[in-house]
Amino acid sequence: MTMGDARRHQLFTELFDANHTKVLAYVRRRLDANVANDAVADTFLAAWKNLDRLTGDPLLWLYGLARGVVANHRRALGRAGRLNVRLSLLDPPSTAPDHADIVGWRDPFAAAFRQLSEPEREVLQIVAWEGLTPAEGAVVLGCSTTAFKVRTHRARRRLRHLLDANEVTQAAVTTRPPARSTAPEVGEPLPKEIS
Amino acid sequence: MRTSWPDERIDRELAIRNPEREENLAGSEHTPAARAVLNRVLAVDPLAVDEWSRSGRTWAWTRQDSRRAFRAVANRKGSRKWRIAVGVVAVVLLAAVAVGVVANGSDSRSTTAPVGRMHTEWRLVSSTGPASPFAATQTSAGLIQSLTCPTTSVCYEVVDGGLLGGTLVQGGIQGGIPLPPAAYESNDGGVTWRQLTLPADVALTTSFTCPTATDCMVGATSGPYGDPGAPAVLLSTQDAGATWTATTVPLTGVITGTDPALDPEVTGQPGYLNQLICFSTQTCFGFGVVPTDQDEQPLTATPALPVSLTVFVRTDDGGATWTTYAFPWMANPDGSPGWSNEEPATFSCATQTSCIGVAQVLSGPDPSGSGVQIPSLFTWSTTNGGTTWSQSWIAGMDGVQNGLSCPSADECLATVSLGGLGSSNDRQQGVLVTTDGGATWAFHQLSSGYGYMGPVSCLKTNDCWVGGSGATTASTAAIFATFDGGTTWSPVQLPPALTGITTIDCVSTVCLAIARPSSATPTLNGQVWIVPSVVLTNG
């Protein structure tokens, strides 16, 4: 190992130790726990290979990488999920949905949030869950601060319209949990979408 | 049009649904799994493999990439039209930005910081009179009042049936005949209620458990009310209580061979369900007690009285067949015989595989010198749907458990009173919180000046509501909220002149709670003495 390698290892280890918790939290908010650790590993592997490109706030840079990794995992899960749906049509599961499924499904806020597009959800999640400022969120999404503010405003406006519309019709709705094959996710109050 | 969803409320609702708090993951980088990831990553030669860089482009589309793409478009033939079009789009975008900034405030961070719901106000949704369906006998030792809300608008309630006949004496009833518990349903968020017609000769012994708004189950005994020989049954409805089916639950005495003299009292004697949790119309978990031939310790009667055992039963076919697990009788942590005729235990099952129960067994002298003993708290837990259970002591926590809610397989919050059984001043009111499936528990004490903490309902450990008594007098109703895992608690504003939050249930973002007016006295409803209750909500 050369001196340069040793320095690189040290820098990366410090980066890992300082940001692992936040990256893990970011990923677990968006993916099922079963695949979250793999996604975190992929994120840091990408960081290791691109360490020379690191500029600015390391955490925001890692969030940006994690965002891409999460998208990749969702695509993979989406393919697997569609296959599972087809299989379940051949052999319907006998088990009932988890209690957490039911709780999540009967939540009108979660239902409305689920109707947003993935970019709309992401911008709201970054603000509410990661607690980033518009300037910080813009770095993660790779856009300008102004663009981030506009996206936030539009996402909130669309969610508000959905919630207001749901409130009008909610009284007539009898909430029933979905069958397992159509339940969007397991065990979380908000969906971690498979795109 | 006015909206009930301003930006602040949207952000607040999102924040409380944060599925993973960083504080719950503190120190994650030091876990073996994380170190394995680090070592695996460091073993990769970053310069030898470039597919990561290429694939990285797909997930990190940079501003440089955008400029490059724009230049490519702008340099195409006919680029003047493109430039004009882009200019128009830019003007429109600038206008949208201006509108967005104005509507959003100068800095969205100031309105989007994660906040809890601690400012939510509670209000009275039903203040029914003496003829109220909510009836609770003040003289009843085992006051039953439990609320189950499968949706924000549909709730079911089990209450004491009141006392038939008797005489009003100093606010209580003397000589009345207890009636079996009654059941009520509301489909308008607790504003109005109707009494459900139950099968003849059943007495409810559990709360409702409802996988959907119309599919509900409840535990009961079938036979004359008060008959110790009445077997346990599962009552099921699929039409919101209009019709019912009853199936027998095999809860009968357990012979361990400890004291054969007790066998005649135990053999074939039924137990009863005291908790029921159904995940569907097919799969239900039940918890109950059955008689066993274990002697009560220390012996307080001759011949000895049998100890009751806590048991777990499970059905996956709507009650047609059941599997049973009898929890072993617990000695004290030091091995001495426990002093208990049963093990008061409360269970919560977040999933069909994971349940946690908090129980207590009496041990140790009471420091107040009252002669009674302080219970030791311990947990039962299963991760395989009740096939096997493991027990562990909650070390250093002696007291009684009052309520339990597990919003996930790893997270539970139990309301407890720790310390002596003598004066209430000797006790520490607060909550025990676990985030690792019951392996470890942390105690968070309620601020001094507040009283009892009882029923609890959690949407997540970081979003829990507890009913109890308030700061001014022990009889004043109070509801506490925590949004940080129980570390801090905020009493919420309640309507005045209420006493005793008897039950609370939260679904989605709405909670309902039942309390009684401070001035409530038993009143005759026909020949039945009842006590009115009121319904509160923060929705």
Image: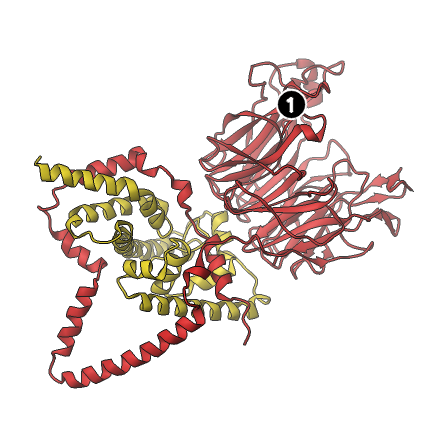
Chain colours: A yellow, B red
The residue wearing badge 1 is: B374
Say left or right for A51 vs B88.
Answer: left
In this view, the residue farthest toward the front is: B106
Q: Residues within 10 Å of mark 1 (few under 14, many from 20)?
A: many
Residue B267: quadrant of the picture: top right
Say left or right for B212 vs B297.
Answer: left
Residue at x 38%, y 55% (from the top left corner): A192
Residue at x 46%, y 60% (from the top left corner): B11
Q: Is residue B433 visible?
A: yes
Where residue B450 appears, as percent x and y from the top left, is 66, 40
Kindly identify which chain the residue marked by label 1 belongs to.
B
Residue A171: quadrant of the picture: bottom right
Q: Nearer the viewer, residue A162 or A22?
A: A22
Question: Is residue B307 placed above or below A98 in the rendered structure?
Answer: above
Question: Is residue B507 placed above or below B93 in the rendered structure?
Answer: above
Q: Amino acid at mark 1?
A: Ile
The quadrant in which the N terminus of chain B is found is: bottom right
Where residue B300 appears, as percent x and y from the top left, is 74, 16
Say left or right for B341 vs A187.
Answer: right
Where residue A170 appears, as percent x and y from the top left, is 56, 66
Where residue B320 appears, as percent x and y from the top left, is 57, 41
Q: Is residue B242 visible?
A: no
Q: Nearer the viewer, residue B188 or A89?
A: B188
